[in-house]
Structures are given as structure tokens and as C-alpha cells.
Amino acid sequence: MNSDIMEIMEGVKNGTISTEDAVLMLKKEPFVDIGYASVDMHRNIRQGTAEVIYGAGKSVGQMEGIIDTMQKNGQKNILITRLSVDAYEALSRRFDIKYNKDGCIATIGDIPAPDGIGKIVIATAGTSDIKVAEEAYITASFLGNEVVRIYDVGVSGIHRLFAHLDDIMSASVVIAIAGMEGALASVIGGLCDCPVIAVPTSVGYGASFEGLSALLSMLNSCASGVAVVNIDNGFGAAYSASMINHMR
Amino acid sequence: MNSDIMEIMEGVKNGTISTEDAVLMLKKEPFVDIGYASVDMHRNIRQGTAEVIYGAGKSVGQMEGIIDTMQKNGQKNILITRLSVDAYEALSRRFDIKYNKDGCIATIGDIPAPDGIGKIVIATAGTSDIKVAEEAYITASFLGNEVVRIYDVGVSGIHRLFAHLDDIMSASVVIAIAGMEGALASVIGGLCDCPVIAVPTSVGYGASFEGLSALLSMLNSCASGVAVVNIDNGFGAAYSASMINHMR
Amino acid sequence: MNSDIMEIMEGVKNGTISTEDAVLMLKKEPFVDIGYASVDMHRNIRQGTAEVIYGAGKSVGQMEGIIDTMQKNGQKNILITRLSVDAYEALSRRFDIKYNKDGCIATIGDIPAPDGIGKIVIATAGTSDIKVAEEAYITASFLGNEVVRIYDVGVSGIHRLFAHLDDIMSASVVIAIAGMEGALASVIGGLCDCPVIAVPTSVGYGASFEGLSALLSMLNSCASGVAVVNIDNGFGAAYSASMINHMR
Amino acid sequence: MNSDIMEIMEGVKNGTISTEDAVLMLKKEPFVDIGYASVDMHRNIRQGTAEVIYGAGKSVGQMEGIIDTMQKNGQKNILITRLSVDAYEALSRRFDIKYNKDGCIATIGDIPAPDGIGKIVIATAGTSDIKVAEEAYITASFLGNEVVRIYDVGVSGIHRLFAHLDDIMSASVVIAIAGMEGALASVIGGLCDCPVIAVPTSVGYGASFEGLSALLSMLNSCASGVAVVNIDNGFGAAYSASMINHMR
Amino acid sequence: MNSDIMEIMEGVKNGTISTEDAVLMLKKEPFVDIGYASVDMHRNIRQGTAEVIYGAGKSVGQMEGIIDTMQKNGQKNILITRLSVDAYEALSRRFDIKYNKDGCIATIGDIPAPDGIGKIVIATAGTSDIKVAEEAYITASFLGNEVVRIYDVGVSGIHRLFAHLDDIMSASVVIAIAGMEGALASVIGGLCDCPVIAVPTSVGYGASFEGLSALLSMLNSCASGVAVVNIDNGFGAAYSASMINHMR
Amino acid sequence: MNSDIMEIMEGVKNGTISTEDAVLMLKKEPFVDIGYASVDMHRNIRQGTAEVIYGAGKSVGQMEGIIDTMQKNGQKNILITRLSVDAYEALSRRFDIKYNKDGCIATIGDIPAPDGIGKIVIATAGTSDIKVAEEAYITASFLGNEVVRIYDVGVSGIHRLFAHLDDIMSASVVIAIAGMEGALASVIGGLCDCPVIAVPTSVGYGASFEGLSALLSMLNSCASGVAVVNIDNGFGAAYSASMINHMR
Amino acid sequence: MNSDIMEIMEGVKNGTISTEDAVLMLKKEPFVDIGYASVDMHRNIRQGTAEVIYGAGKSVGQMEGIIDTMQKNGQKNILITRLSVDAYEALSRRFDIKYNKDGCIATIGDIPAPDGIGKIVIATAGTSDIKVAEEAYITASFLGNEVVRIYDVGVSGIHRLFAHLDDIMSASVVIAIAGMEGALASVIGGLCDCPVIAVPTSVGYGASFEGLSALLSMLNSCASGVAVVNIDNGFGAAYSASMINHMR
Amino acid sequence: MNSDIMEIMEGVKNGTISTEDAVLMLKKEPFVDIGYASVDMHRNIRQGTAEVIYGAGKSVGQMEGIIDTMQKNGQKNILITRLSVDAYEALSRRFDIKYNKDGCIATIGDIPAPDGIGKIVIATAGTSDIKVAEEAYITASFLGNEVVRIYDVGVSGIHRLFAHLDDIMSASVVIAIAGMEGALASVIGGLCDCPVIAVPTSVGYGASFEGLSALLSMLNSCASGVAVVNIDNGFGAAYSASMINHMR
């Protein structure tokens, strides 16, 4: 960033950039304002990835506008989370879009070949957690990671988890996804020596209080190396895991 | 109970009991009123155990009065929970009382020989849960149970728990005691085929919210056969476990 | 379990089992992986009962797959909880399935003759709690228990409860089901000398906060011998009660 | 009130009251401002009772000032709630004050002879609730009510409560005081046909959450005729009960 | 109650009642068990009013059964709360039933002439609270009270409340109904010298948390003489108010 | 107000106003009672603005009645918040009404020319917060303010916010609208030296708990000069901002 | 700000500022780093006031260091909030410091003559709220405002509040401070036509939940023009009020 | 792990290990049981670090026992968290121990030279967050990381944070520590392209609810790449950060 400012300064000094232009350049927004959204064109460079569209609460028209703006600015790979089937079908008329129905998540463009350090393991406690897990799976794949999925290995039948010990112990990051009592994160955290990203889910009823139970469990994990993201936030977990798996 | 009423009725019919006395007998309180407390003398028969004194919030004088009344009515074995060291020392001047400092629990009279079906296993996740576990241990012993204690076997190092699998799998009841994320109850619940009484503890900080985290975890256990008592309620867990262990 | 390991060891020693096979056998999963669910085939032996399918959040297709796998592995008696009428009707086209509409619970195979110690009493505070009670009733019957149902005996008209004192006092376990203020568990806990499993329900409005009020009441019961399961968890209560009623 | 305004109007019309004085009279504060507190001198008339001093958080000096102002204005009977022993001792040097240590409540002046309709019954679930009950007892007595106290009759030993059925069924109002699960209010509400004022107390631990459990229970009472006051608010319950017991 | 027992005793003594019958009579349920509900036939006597049917969660068929049983037992006046329009229409085909649409409450039989001490004032803070107020209005009228309704007099325009001061100050009981910040109860509590029953409502959004805000406000009222019922519980408030208004 | 009373007094003194009329005038309600609502006709003068109709929970008929009453009393400019599309369409048949669909807010009459001190800046963190922002925008415009809208400038891409620094630093009041973590209020509060009204929104999922997360964040803002209104309360924020922007 | 950048650019262009220096100037921190705190020297200019020291959790040594740094940089007027008596006494040995014991707040330097638009009225519901009110009073005075204090005018005796109507209706801003049910803010908000800053306090017990009750009440105020700050945040309320009272 | 089992199998096959010994070896606990704690001797290998002692709630004697056991087993580097000054002083009599008073954290043995990928930046919002930050600092250093500390750079004065942009943008992991509104995590998350571990702290008062406010904020961060640990859990954040910084 300093070097950018230096260049501008040099330009001002050399007279190749006018004072007014320099002020403008220093203030120029690295994003395109399309009225209802500020589409961030620099994030690709700043954070090393394409913009992600959070589909929930956006109309099809708004999403089309955002995708158009992105594509005009040369962004080929776009991830759309929390996309309903209806919205997907509407978008599919105009764009070449792939949809994962379980995870309510879509991609435009190619999923790249994995270039991370190792593999990301995604483990779920139950079958009902799969919708969160698939959101994480598509996200992590889209961000260039090798992903191994291990579903329905909750702690009430711990031998099911142990059957996958090899995968878990050789992961570079584990994403542990569980609702109800959320104990999976602690057990996995105690078994492996890599970072664990825990995702509480809203799976359960009664005193699960929409995921609060699993959230508190995971925050209180007695295992070291466990960090937590928001309830049902499969995307966020995969994003963090990908960052970790791409450490320089 | 019917037989009691029947006997009274027969007495009325036979004239050996006056109408007025019958009414009185039907209403007669099976407890001694000592002003500040109703000391229950029939519970021994009705629930098959001696009265327990909940020491918290009672003055030494009040406890002395209750013990005196009990002893006058022939109750020899008395359990006092939540008893401070100071109160214990004051009581020990007048009564032959044994004190468990970790569990803040005392007994007057003899701990009987175990007469339950099998053994009760008390397992704790951490060292800090021991104070709750010892309350459960003394209570269960006092109520005539063989007890095995397994401490500091939390799920973050699950091999520690597995080293005690034999005890756990041969228990008639397991009391699983854990604070923080409370995952121990689910893991044990999945391993054994006997009832598990789970005790959340207030051990932890921050988002453990004084035991709420462990409580919600345990209530949401994905393992079947797990029932829960109040936070830090070692006594209640042991009482339930003893009832189960003494099934006719 | 030790004996299994011993056998494998003997086989290795005798040369009847190769080293590699032994490692495999020690690690071999005692369940069938059908992609979206790990169907547990050993639980029947390990916990003494057939697998239960938690129907909520599973598609008809997923449930069919699980039932098929179970039946192929010789499990004849299957319990499906939280099953909607629609899903029941879909399943009934392929399987010989019985449905309890109030309890949203279904059974495949025969309900066995009771083989427990005594009878389980299921008591509800109100008419609206019946849906939870019926889930408990079918579960307990399915697990081989004699069950007595006493409905609508809440504490605001305590004479209704007292009319059933004989049943309550001769139970081996009582399941006390109540929403709103949940006082039934404490009153029953004080009347009988057997374990009480309390089930808070989400019946009520306003400050019942979806069952939180009854849950906290039951956890704070001043009666000893009361343990609590999750809100509306009729299945879990019956499972625990059945374990207790089948104590060796 | 209308009559007061009418009188003032007549005075204005007749010239016995100047316009300015009339405005002043209409606005005149019916209280004495002593800087840190507005001592209400009309409440005696407006609400039919003397001013009550809420002692918590007031210095001895502040209370002395308030009492002095009251006495100068002719108020002889003063009730001071939430008064610490230390503050009581300080006040007793200047005033003729009687102190109830359990209830942390004091009175200056005479407790009047009962002039209510009938008697107020104060029932507590446990011994630890007595401090709230005594606050209610002194308040109700001070406000001219006959009071019957029934302590330690919680629902876990419901025969203890039944021994006092006569008192409860002949009360004009019952104040039901309970911590933990707070079931006493519902049981009493179902037994008697008079209004019940329920007082949740902070007695308990763990999931009682400082009285929240009892509060929610009482608000959700399935018995009709139960209204609730704040946690530990013995004074408020007695005040409401006294109003009811003095219905014209 | 004692006199009943006395009579039975005398009968036993005189031989007009057999011992077995006496036991039966002492245990005989004063209610009719119709399977899914215990219809309480003695409550009329015990609590001085007809049975009330809580319509929420009951099927039309269940309600028909309960009404039939009641009518067969001579109860002419029946109140049905939380009754949907659809259920009302179904019931109106068989019964002579009057329906208050705002309050979702119906009556069978006549509303009696008022026989209480004075009048009950029902005040609401806003227009949206009217549905709760009408439930209270019909209930109080049904129970024999003169009722005055004052709607939309919330504290943000306090002159609106003051225009009704005469009614409020001459009430025997005031029911103060408010959502949002619930301040109406405190203001009315400070103005009048009769008991106030406060009803928090779920009116509001955001931080009103479904009525929690108004509930806490009312419980913390700085005005004496305010007692609180459950959120949206217009029936319960009217029931308590009627009891108070009918003090002997 | 005093001058009004003075005038009435003078009238009484002079005999131009009868005593009875004076009492009436002093008590006369400055509002029109139309049964289900007290339409406040003096608020225009008392608070310097027209009455606002809170549309949520009111029927079209009720709103028509209120508008008719207002118009008959000479109020031309009416704001209707929380108005559904359906209700808008019904009202548009009778009234000349403009509707902002995003904000669910309508106006009858003209939006006046801005007469405030400076401009009000409305900033939102995301696109989903726009519905709350538009409610604030129409309200603030309706109340005579110049408004600048800056949408989708959340703190996760802080350069987007900085591109609008000039607007923010020259505002007379800023309304900061954000869901999720609600950090926008603190960042803006630290950047500008004018009052900030923060509006938490219910945008988010999981641990946002319907806006609780943003609400708590904003209340705990480490920036001085930030005050908070209810979740999603765009109207209230604009009302406060307009008051501030019209300081005398 | 633009003008600053322009000046730097001109300097670069003219050669009076080197490129490196320009970069430095653009990045230069407008604060002094003293290790444990970043003392902000530009805030005086940026936000128009001196730095405020939040005393809670800072050692006397840390505060001395911050004050020294401030004074060396020419700041004469310093406000220290949440300062204990002990810390005040320690600081008074080195600095000329004035202390308000009720508000736990101190000032160094002179309190300026009021230069705001009008007066700020600070009203409290009770005597116990005074500690928060005094924090607000000293802060508002320190920031150049005329302040009127009206204490102990809670809504349970609303005539006390009305006696101060003149002050309230002529205020430019009102700070309404109340614990318990927090109704004061709504009543004042309905009476006056200026902005109201509401401060919930932790005064109360039981269901006040440390100020939560008053906080929710104030956020749900049915009066328009009420904005809320954190519980017990007298400083923040005064800071916002001062900003409003100094509108250009 | 497989290789270990293979070796044992080979031994059994070869007869060098008896069957019984093999069973024992497979079950042998990789920890030393010292009664009150299971000291884990394999964690060093399994998780790549020395055992950490959580000092809170352990007596000096218990800690001495654990340290002795560790040292006897060859562990030289020991970290003790949550250690009080008193306990530190007691331990320092027997062990060569270094203590960080701000962080209440101690080390035995040498802090190794950094061997991580890059540097870990620890940033705090305020001065009061330093105690959590120092716990993180010592932990991260102890685990072989280069650490840069940036304290008191909260978002209310965002220029303070920007002065450290170079450090933040070149970090391999950032630990963002903040209480109150916790916005620091989101702002940093938006600025840098490395993983962010967010630590909410209990700093604040009122509606911060002991850290709940910051916790919810951080979980709802609109910035991608932010994962959260428990309130005040500086150790856990550093442990996760170190794992990430040591990715293979």
C-alpha cells in the first residue's frame, strides 16, 4: 500500500499526476457503486479471492445486477450462498451456474484445482447437519482446497468417528459441524493436532434453542485449538479453513 | 395407604375409634413442627430413606434443632449437604459427625454396607468437578451403594476415558459430571447401556454462564438414556442413581 | 469387549488371523455407511435395543434407505419418531408400519410383551401434553414395558392426581410430563419412592418461553429423585425409564 | 378530586381565591422536597396508607431526614423495608423503632389492630424463604391485617401443606412464597377460592438463576386466580394483599 | 370439607355407609374422566365458578365432548377462551354460543347480572392491546362484574389517561394492559388506591421480545399494589380481578 | 400551558366561563375518541408534528377511520408506518397516498421543503438493512429534513465507508443502521463530531438472535455520542434525528 | 481533511515537502503512544472536546501517565469518570482535581461557562438513580451546558413529575434516568417536544436483572424522540445531550 | 498409530509379546494417574506441545504434584495459566518459574526461539483488554511464535488502528481482542487477508453482560475469516493461532 502512495507521490513530484488527480486517486473507491450495493472489485487482490454474494434477502434482480457488474470487471468465479431453489432457477436462465441443493449454494465459473497445503476434513455429528456441511464443502472446494467429507459421526456412537481416525489425524484443518450438544468439536479437538473450526448448527429442538446449546458447548470446549463461527455458518468456517490451509 | 384408611374405618365401625379421632387421624401430620421447619418423620418409610438436611442458608442453631428432633424420633443416620467448614466444626462439638471437605457434606451415623443391584460409577470431566462428585459419592454411599470414582477423564483426551471402559460398561448407573461443554455425558451415554444421570457443573468461565452451557449440552445429548439434574446437584444425581440401583 | 480382543489376539498368535486382518478387525466399523447416514448395526447388542430413526428433517427417501439397510441386516423392530402424517403415508406404501397420530411416532414390527420389572406410569398435567405422552407411551411399549397412562392430572386440581395415587405409588418409574409451570414433577416426586423422569413440554404461551419455564421448574425440583430430559422429549424419557425398568 | 377543583373554582368566582393562587393551588405539589427525595405527604390520603421507606441504597442520614420530615408532617406510623442491622442500630439511637431481623424490616409507631375483611395467610415452601415471608408479615400487620404464617410446606411433601388446609381454605388472600420450582403457588391456587399473590424467591442455586425459575413457574401457573410480584418482593405482595383484604 | 368427612364417618358409625363405600367416597374423584380430559365437576363449588375451557390446542371434537359432559352435569354457563373463528363456527352448529371475535373468546349460557363489590376498569395502552382486553372483558362480565373499558390511553400521551381519572379512581380493581414498555401499570398504580392486575402483552417488535419487555417492567413497577399475570393472559387477569371484586 | 389555565381562570372570574365549564375545559380531552383509538389532535402543537399512524396490527377500516378523523380536524400531512402493500392498495382507493415499498411506509399530503439545521446522513452496513433505512428516509424527509443516503458501507470493507467521509463529517446527525455485529455505529461515532442515532436491525442469522447482537453492540459502543433506538426502528431514529436537526 | 491533503500535495509539487515526508505525514498518528494507552491528541479538534479518561480498570499510575501526557500536550481540561475515592485521593496529591463523590467523577481544570443552545434537564425516577445522574451532571457541565436537575420524580407519584413541567417543557434536551421499570422516559417523552436521552440504571432487584428491565422498557418506548444509552451510562447520555445542545 | 498397533501385532505373532500383554498394551493409559488429575504424558507427541496447567481452581499442592510428575517424565517446558500472584509466589519457592502479572500466566523452562511461519499480531481495543492479551502473548511466545503487540487501537478512533496497518497486513494470524461492542474483529477482518482469531473480553458494564455483547458481535462478524474463542480466553486464541502459524 505504501508503494502505491509512493508512486502517486512520485507522479505528483514529476508533474505526471496533477495535484487534483492525486487527491482523487488517494480517495478513489476501489469498488463500483450500483445503488443498492457496493460491489468490491479490489477484494480479489486485497484478500486473494473473488467476491462472494450472500444471497439471503437479495432479490433476483439485485443479484443479477451484482453478477453483471462483477463479470464486466473481469471476475469469472463467483460464489452465491443462501440461494433458494427458485432464485437459482431464475438466475440459471441468464448465467452458467451450478447449484448444490443440500447446501443452497451456487457457483459461477470453474472450481479450481486444489492448491492448499493439505486437505480439509469436514465432519458432521448427524444427517441433519449435512446442509451446513455442504455449504462448507462447496465453499472450500471453490477456494482451492482438497476436501474430505465424513458425515454422521456424532459422539453418541463414538466408534463411528474412530473409523475415520486416519482422515482426521492427517487433516490440515478440520471443520466440525454439530447441533444439539455440539460435543463433536471437543472430541475431534482432543484427537487431532491441527486447527479445528467448529460450526454449531440449529439442528435440534427444545433446549437446543436454535443452536445456542451447540454454540455454547463449542465456545467452552475443553480441547485446545478449537475456534468457533456463527450458528449454521458453513461458509464462514470454510473461508477460515481455506485461509489456514493456504498459509504462506 | 388404603390399608391404613381401612383400619381406621374398621375402628370407627367397631367403636374403638371415635369419629372425631378418626377425622384427626386422617388429618394428622406425619411430621414434627419445630417452628422454622417441618421435620418429616415419615419420609423414612414413605421414600425408604432418612431425612436429608440441606445445610445452605440454615443457621447452626436451626440445624441443631432439626438433628435433635430427628434423633429423638429415632433416626440415626442423617446426611447434611452444603455444610460449610465453620458450621461443621460447630456441629461437631455436639454430634458425632463425619465431614467430607471437598464435597462440603457430612454424615451422622454409619454408612451402611452396599445393598444395591450393582455399582454406581461417578465420572468427572475435570479436576474442578470433584467437589460436585464428592457430594454425589458420599450421598450414594450413605444410601447403600457401591461406588467407583473416575475423575478427570474429559473428552478432550478421550483415551483417558477409554482406560476406564471396563468400569463404565459394567456399571448399573453412571453419574457423569462435567462443566464447560459438558460433552462427557453424551460420550458415556453412547458407550454404556445403563442409565446415565448427568450433572452439569458451574466449572468454567465466560460463555459457560455459570453452568448453563453444560446444562444445555446435557439436555440436548444425542445419546439415549441420559437424564439431567440441576447444575452442581451432586446430591440429586446420587439420590436418583441410588433409587435406580435399588429397583425391586 | 476384552474377550473380542482376546479372540483376535489368539487368532494372530495361532496364525489363523493375519496381522493386517487383525488391525482391520480392530478398526472395522460396526455400522453400514449408506452415504448420508451411518446405520448402526451393533447398537442392538451394545445397548440392548434396535436402532431408532429420528424422523425430523429426514426425507422419505432417506428413511426408506435406512429402513432397507436395517431390514437387510436382520433388524425387524424399528421405531420412527417425529414422523409427519405425510411421511407416514409415503412409508406405509412400502412397509408394514403402524402409526400413532397424536405422538407422531411409528413402529415397524411387533411390540414385544412387557419384560420389565414393573410398570411405567406416564402422567400429564394437561390435555395438550398428550402428544409428548403418546411418544413416550409407544416408545416404552416398544421397548418391552407395561405402561399405565394418567392424563390431565395437573396440580391446579390436585384431587385429580390423588385419584390415581395407587398407580403412582406402585410404579417402578414415573414419567411426569407438564408444560406451563411444570409443577407436576415435584408433586409426584414427593409422593412416590421410585425414580421420576420429568419431561417439560412447550405447552403454554407468553412467559412459558417454549418450555423454558417448565424446564427450569423441573431442574429445580425440591423433590429428590427427579431427573429431567429435553423439552418435548417423550422418546428420551421413555428410553431412560425403560433402562431403569430393565435393571438387572 | 373534581370536588377539590370545584371548590377552587367557586373560590375564584367568589373572589376568595385570586386567579394566581388558584393556578398555584392547582399546581401545588402535595409533597415536600428535601433535596435528595420527594417525601410524599398526600399518599396517606391518596392511597390510604403512610409512606413507606425503601431502605436499600439509602444512607442513614438520608433516612433520618425522610423520617424527620414525615414526623413533622404528622405521620406517626412509618415502615422501613430492606434495612440492614447496622442501619437499624444507627436509627434506633434517635427513633423508637422496632426491627424484624429475619425480614430486615422495621416499624416506627404502632402496628394497628386488624381491620381487614378476613385473614391473610402467608405460606412458604421452605425454611430459606422465611426472610421474604417475614417482610410480608410485618408489612401486612402494619397495614392492619390479621396474618397467619405457615412455613416450610413445599409441594415435595404435600401432606405438610394439607395439614394446614383449614387455614388456607378460610383465608381471604393467600401469599404463596417459594423459590426453586415455585410450585407452591399453583397447588395453593388450585385448593382455595380466594386470590393468591405469588412471590418467587431467589432461594436455590444453579438453574434457579436467582429466582427466574420460580418467577416463570408462577407466571405460568395453571391455577386461576394467581398473580405475581417481583422476586423476593415480600413487601409488594403484602401491600397488594392488604388492598384486597380491605376492599370496600 | 371437614363436615363432609364427618358425615361419612357418622355414616360408617351408624352403619348406613359400609367401610368399603366410605373408603371409596373419600377417594371418589369429583370429576368425570372422558379419556383425554378430566372434566372438573366440583370446581363450581370449590372455587365458586363454572369450568372454563382453554380452547388452544383442543380439537373441535374434544371441546364438544367436554361441553356435552358439562351440560349433562348441569353446568349451563361455560366460557371458552382462545377459540379460533373456525372452531367457533363448528361449535355454533351444535351449541347456542356467543363469540367475541377480537378476544377470541366465547360463552355458552347467560352472562349474569353484576354482583361484585364495584366495577372493574380495563385500561389498555394501545389499540393493538384490545384483543387481550376483550378476553378480559368477556371473562369479567361472565363472572358477574360490572366492567368499564378504557382503551388506547398509553403513557406517551398521558392527558388521554387523565381524561379518565374519575373511572380509574373509583374502580374496585384495575386491569392495566400494555405491551412495549408496559409503563401503564406503574402510572395507574400510582394514581389509584385499589389493586391493579397488570397484563403484559406481546404487542411490539424488536427488543419487546414477545412481551418480555412489558413483563419485566410490570414486575419492577415502582408503584405498590401492582401484581402481574402471564403475557397476553387477559383471562387470568379478569379471573383474579373478579375474585377480588367478590371479596366476602 | 400555564397561560391556558390563566385564561380559563380569568374567564371564571369575569363570569364569561361558568364554573362547570371551567372544570370541563380543564379536563377536556385534546383528542377525539373514535372508539378503538384516541386520535391525538393536539400533538401537532405539543410536539410540533402531525400524528403518525403505526400501521402494524391495524385493520384497513381502523386506519380509514383514523385518517378521516385527522383530515376532518384539518391535518393534511399524515405518515403511516409498517403499512403492508395490500393495506396500501386498499387505502389508495380512498386517499391520495404515496408508498415506499422498501420501507413499507406511506405519506398523505406533501413532503415539506427541508427546514432543519443541516443534513441527516443515513448509512447502512448492508443491502439488507435498506428496508429499515427507507423507513427512516421517508420519515426524516416528511419531517422537513435534507437527507443523504449512503448504503452498503459496512465495516468489513472500511474503504467503502471512507469514500463517503465528506458526507459523514459534514452531517448534523448520522443515523447508523446495521444488523449482524452492528459495528458501523462505533466506527461512524469515532469519525464524526455530531450525534449518532444507531438502529440495530434484525438482519443476520444464528447468533444475531433477531437483532440482539447488533443492539448490544450499539449500546456498548466505545464511541461517545451514540444513542440507540429499538431494533428495526427506522421511524424512531428519524424522529429523534429530526428533533435534533431542528434544535432552536 | 481534503484541504490538508491538498496542502501536502502542493508541498510535494513545490518541493517543500519530500516524497518520503509526505507519506509519513499522511500516515502520521495524531496521538501519543505511551505503551499501555494511545492518548488521542487530535480528538479535541476532531470532536470538539478534551479527552476523557475512563477510570474503571486503570491503575493510578496509568492515569497519572495519561494526565501527564495530556497536560504536556496543552490539554487543560480533563474529565475522569468511574474514579474510586481511593484513586481520587491518590491523584489529588499530584493534580488540582475536583471530585463528585456521588457520581464517582472528577475534573481537572475549569468547568466552562455554558455555551449551549438551551438547558439540559436531568430527571431521575428515584433517589438511588442519583449516582448515575451526577455523572451526567458533571459531564454535561464540563462540556459547557446549563443543567437543571430534577430528582426522585418517578411515575408512581406522577404529580411529583408534573410539579416540574415548566422545566421539562422548556428544556432543549432531557436526560431521563430510571431503574426498575424505566417508565420515566416514556412519560417525559410524551410530555416534551425535545430529544430525550434515556439512561436505564441497574437500580432494583429480582426481575430488574441488573438494569435489563429498564433497558428494554426504554428501547420499547411508545413515545417518539427517545434514544437510549447503556445501563448506568450517565457520561454517554450527557455527551450525546451536549452534542445536541451545541448543534450549529 | 497404526504402526504402533502393527508392531504390537508383530510381537504377538512372533511370540515376543504375550497375548495378555498385548491386550494390556492396547489398553495402557498414556498418562499418569496421580489421583486428582490425569497428567497426560503423550500429548507432547500427539499434539506437538507440552502439557498446559489450567491454574484456576487448583491448589498449590495439586499444581506442585502435577509439575513434579511432568518433570519426572522429562517435560521441561510448562505453561501455567490463570495463576494468582499468591500461588505464583508459593510455586516460586520450589520451581524456577517466570510470571507475567498482567496476564496471570507463568512459565517453567525456556521460551523457545520462534519457529512459526510468520508473526502473530495481537491487537486490543482498549487498555483494559491487556490482561487477556498478555495471556495470549506469553502463550504464543511459549509455543514458538514471533509476536507483535498492538494495544488500545479500538474502532472509536480508527486512525490509531490505521497507524499499524503495516503490521496487521503482514501478519500470518491476527488475534483481535475486544470487550464492549467487539467491533475490532470485523474491522481487522476486513483489512487483512490472514485468519483472525477473535477474543471477546468481559471488559465493559451494563449491557455488555460480562462479555456477551462482544461475543455475539464477533460471531456475527460480516468479515470473512474470523473465528471466535471463549470470552477472555487469551490462551485458547494463542493456541489456535500457533497451530495455524505452524502449518506444515
Image: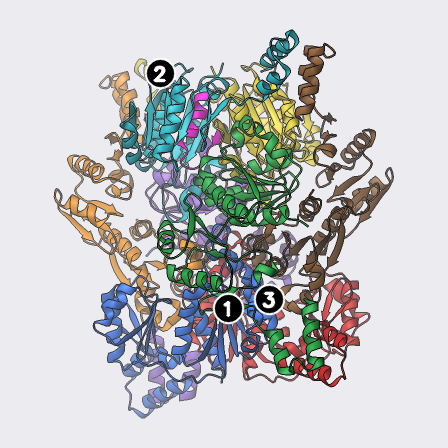
Chain colours: A yellow, B green, C brown, D blue, E red, F purple, G orange, H cyan
Circles 2 and 1: CB atoms closer than 8 Å = no
* Location of residue B217 in the rendering, given as x and y in whole percent from the top left corner: 56, 41
Q: Which mark is residue H112?
A: 2
Q: Is residue G176 left or right of residue H11?
A: left
Q: Amino acid at mark 3?
A: Val
**Segment colored magenta:** H225-243
Q: Are marks 2 and 1 on the same chain?
A: no
Question: Could you classify mark 3 by the number of other residues whose Cα lies within 10 Å: few (under 14), some (14-19), or many (20 or more)?
Answer: many
**Is residue H238 magenta-colored?**
yes
Q: Residue at x 80, y 43 (%)?
A: C107
State which quadrant residue E237 falls in. Answer: bottom right
Question: For the residue labelled by badge 3, is the local secondary structure a helix, a strand or a loop?
Answer: helix
Front residue of D163 and F133: D163
**Quarter location, residue H121:** top left
Q: Is residue A182 left or right of residue H111?
A: right
Q: Secondary structure beneath disc 2?
A: loop
**Distance of mark 2 from mark 3, alpha carbons?**
69 Å
Marker disc for residue E132: 3
Distance of mark 2 from mark 1, alpha carbons? 70 Å
Q: Give the residue drawn at x 77%, y 35%.
A: C63
Which residue type does callout 2 highlight? Pro
The residue that mark 1 highlights is B32
Q: Nearer the viewer, residue F124 or B140?
A: B140
Q: Nearer the viewer, mark 2 or mark 3?
A: 2
* Rendered view: F53 above or below G38: below
**Viewer-closest of H41 and E146:** H41
Q: Is residue H228 magenta?
A: yes
The secondary element bearing badge 1 is classed as: strand
Amino acid type, label 1: Val
The N terminus of chain G - image quarter: top left
Share a chain, discs 2 and 3?
Answer: no
